[in-house]
Amino acid sequence: MSEFLRNSEYKKKLLKDIIKELHAGKSPEELKERFKGVLKNVSPIEIPLIEQELVKEGIKASEIAKLCDLHVLIFREAVQNSLKVDDLPDGHPLKNLALENENITKDAEMLGLYAATLDRVNDQKDIENILSTVKEIGKKIKGIYYTHYDREEMVIFPYIERRGLSAVAQVLWRKHDEIRIMIKKLQNLLKKIGSEDSERINEIIKLSRELSTALVDMVFRENNILYPTLKTLLSEGEWFAIKLQETQFGYYGIKPKDDWKPDAKPLYPNDLSNFTARDILSKIPDHMKEEFKKQNVELMPDSYQAKKEDDFSLNIGYLSPKLVELIFKHMPVDVTFIDENDRVKFYSGGKRIFQRSPSIIGRPVQLCHPPKSVYIVNKILNTLKSGKKDKAEFWIQMGPQFVYITYYAIRDENGTYRGTLEVTQEVSRIRSLKGEKRLLDWE
């Protein structure tokens, strides 16, 4: 029977039967148990391809789309078996990732479906309507890479890298970037498309199918490799720290609850140490160990400590007084700080646009300006102190230099005014920049 189930024609027939049942009004929940065994023998990568074959046979995309809800139910059960997601509290970062993957799977399938439909219609109105739908899906899918993928790369990957699993993170990141390129390419094609532009339509069909497959494949990799590994390796304190960081990236298609507050101290990657390869290997899933053997991956846990003996702790990170001095000295801006008493507290060293001398430290800022302009200085400071504005900006031409000056109100976590930061920058070159120069273009 298992060999028979792998037969493509038989799978298509079964999916047709499911579509008929859904069209007749049966709910996905009703059909889940009946067809679970069948769908388990259809890999996540196969489903979009079979659906596209069904479109070619004349079944409407809107009908086949009803399958997506059923896939998500089966998908959820499969993830539940490997991750036990339902055991995780609402708002847990791992649960958020798994729920996002449900939406990614559904949207990827829809993209493939409508691309397949586009391949078989000739009526201009139908083409316009389908292109409009593909544009909507394409626009939505773009959100995957600056929410779901960015969050994994910037927040999650450092935890597995700390344990020496950098190879896993790098492989997944490369796959993310391949998908990003495909999404951007699709976006550019869709911007220029017309209903009579057959060459570009063919490109869109081909690229949409490839993107649909790549997205579903990535979901499969994450659910079967990355997430089980994370669940096994990461402690509650690490997940809590991830929770505190992830909101700045946003989520794909979900609005997680914020009521998960574990009784644990947040642990960031740099807080972790003393890992051994033996300890890590004892915890990761067996199929991961096999993958390491195939790729000759050698686990090398990272024991680097960011905080040095003479460093002091900042809100984020650690610096020594010497490094603070060097950083300010090399910044491409002039910085001067005036405290809540209008006294000059600090200015950055190095090459400056407006010269300063150590004699002004502790001096009232009003006395650092010509008497005729003091009333303007006071007006700016009073406005910033009052909260009416948070910044004041000016720009002036000084010979060949175009100088941009900004005053920022500095307030603490309670909103109390603590001083004003003056930032000055020569921006002639910045104003002249055109086009793009990306990181990979650097020589």
Image (tube, helix red, strand yellow):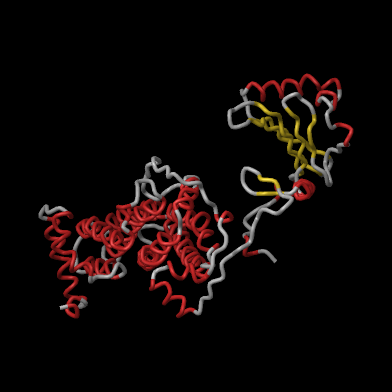
Q: Is residue 89 above or below residue 394?
A: below
Q: Is residue 420 left or right of residue 257?
A: right
Is the C terminus in the top left, top right, bottom left or bottom right quadrant? bottom right
Q: Is residue 229 left or right of residue 370?
A: left
Q: Is residue 244 above or below residue 193?
A: above
Snapshot quadrant of residue 9: bottom left
Snapshot quadrant of residue 368: top right
Snapshot quadrant of residue 353: top right
Q: Is residue 66 above or below residue 119?
A: above
Q: How many marks?
A: 0
Position in image of residue 371 (x %, y %): 86, 20
Q: Is residue 347 left or right of residue 319?
A: right
Q: Is residue 122 left or right of residue 163?
A: left
Position in image of residue 115 (x %, y %): 32, 63
In the image, 90 versus 170, the foreground residue is 90
The answer to whether residue 199 shows anywhere in this view is no
Q: Is residue 131 above or below residue 325?
A: below
Is the N terminus in the top left, top right, bottom left or bottom right quadrant? bottom left
Position in image of residue 404 (x %, y %): 73, 38
The answer to whether residue 427 shows anywhere in this view is yes
Position in image of residue 238 (x %, y %): 48, 53
Kindly identify the residue that appears in the image at 19 percent across and 72 percent down: 11
In the image, 116 versus 79, the foreground residue is 79
In the image, 356 versus 427, the foreground residue is 356
